[in-house]
Image (cartoon, rainbow, N blue to C red):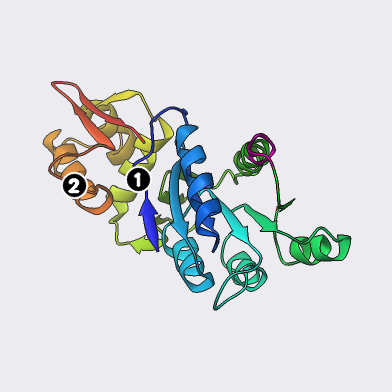
């Protein structure tokens, strides 16, 4: 499995797309063109590798070929659909109606027959991503590979459950709900600890440090929870 995540930063959303295709030429062509559009791209060329990436990397969309070595695409689609609601676009050389029905019944969101133009393919990708945003449940917060379950009070990174304390969870939720806005330490104290809290504002800094250790790729150089000097913090993607 190959991780091609160094995409050109063009689109606002910067979504991660997993392409699972055993035709190396088509795989690299799709990956290249998707990256030119600003998407981050992860690739796999076998069914088992695609299944693992779909489970562990939390892509925003999966492009999945039907005919794959070791484990076919329909089986991969069925397994993933029992575990996630990630949109799946099936690719196939078969154009029969029965084959399309089987693919859609397996849990695919869309079905593209080879050969196809990249313009059509990109339009299908955008449509699938829009549907996921419009269907996103209000009891979740999502930022790239980070998912917050507000009802269950659980946080997942790349599909893995994180061990957050009660206050760390509330602090993360407050920051994510106001993504892009600068929140002062006093405001965070009031929102997370309550109006009647009389402790030090540095309590926020301590919890931010603990939170960074769990959600940042490099806690010493944070890119998600950014410090705004003398004011507070801002959550970014």
Badge 2 density bin: few <14, some 14–19, many ≥20, Cα 10 Å: few
Above or below: residue 214 compared with residue 234: below
**Relative image position of residue 90 (x, y in whole percent):** 67, 57
In the image, farthest residue toward the bottom:
70
Q: Is residue 182 at all visible to an observer of this figure?
A: yes
Q: Quadrant of the C terminus?
A: top left
* Residue interval drawn in magenta: 117-121
Choose between 21 and 199: the one closer to the eye: 21
Residue drawn 31% across the image and 39% down it: 192
Above or below: residue 101 compared with residue 123: below
Res. 233 image quadrant: top left
Res. 184 image quadrant: top left
**Relative image position of residue 79 (x, y in whole percent):** 60, 72
Of labels 2 and 1, earlier in sequence is 1
Above or below: residue 15 compared with residue 56: above
- Residue 24 lies left or right of residue 165; in this view the side is right
Q: Which residue is mark 1?
A: 170
**Relative image position of residue 201 (x, y in whole percent):** 15, 33
In the image, farthest residue toward the front:
25
Q: Is residue 151 at all visible to an observer of this figure?
A: no
Q: Is 120 included in the stretch rendered in magenta?
A: yes
Magenta segment, principal secondary structure? helix
> What's the mark number on residue 218?
2
Badge 1 density bin: few <14, some 14–19, many ≥20, Cα 10 Å: some
Residue drawn 22% across the image and 37% down it: 197
Residue drawn 36% across the image and 46% down it: 5
Choose between 165 and 121: the one closer to the eye: 121
Q: Quadrant of the N terminus?
A: bottom left
Element assignment for label 2:
loop
């Amino acid at each position: 499995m190959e991780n091609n995540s160094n995409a050109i930063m063009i689109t606002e959303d910067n979504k991660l797309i997993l392409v699972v295709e055993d035709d190396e030429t088509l795989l690299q062509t799709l990956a290249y063109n998707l990256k030119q559009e600003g998407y981050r791209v992860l690739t796999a060329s076998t069914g088992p590798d695609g299944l693992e990436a779909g489970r562990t990397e939390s892509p925003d969309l999966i492009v999945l070929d039907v005919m794959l070595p070791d484990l076919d695409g329909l089986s991969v689609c069925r397994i993933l659909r029992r575990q996630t609601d990630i949109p799946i676009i099936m690719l196939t050389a078969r154009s029969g109606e029965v084959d399309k029905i089987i693919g859609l019944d397996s849990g695919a969101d869309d079905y593209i027959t080879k050969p196809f133009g990249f313009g059509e393919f990109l339009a299908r990708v955008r449509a699938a991503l829009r549907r996921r945003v419009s269907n996103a449940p209000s009891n979740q917060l999502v930022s790239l590979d980070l998912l917050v379950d507000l009802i269950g009070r659980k946080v997942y990174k790349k599909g893995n459950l994180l061990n957050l304390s009660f206050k760390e969870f509330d602090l993360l939720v407050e920051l994510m709900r106001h993504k892009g806005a600068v929140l002062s330490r006093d405001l965070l104290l009031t929102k997370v600890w309550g109006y009647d809290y009389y402790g030090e504002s540095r309590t926020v800094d301590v919890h931010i440090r603990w939170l960074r250790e769990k959600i940042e790729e490099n806690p010493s150089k944070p890119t998600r929870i950014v410090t705004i000097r003398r004011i507070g913090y801002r959550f970014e993607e």
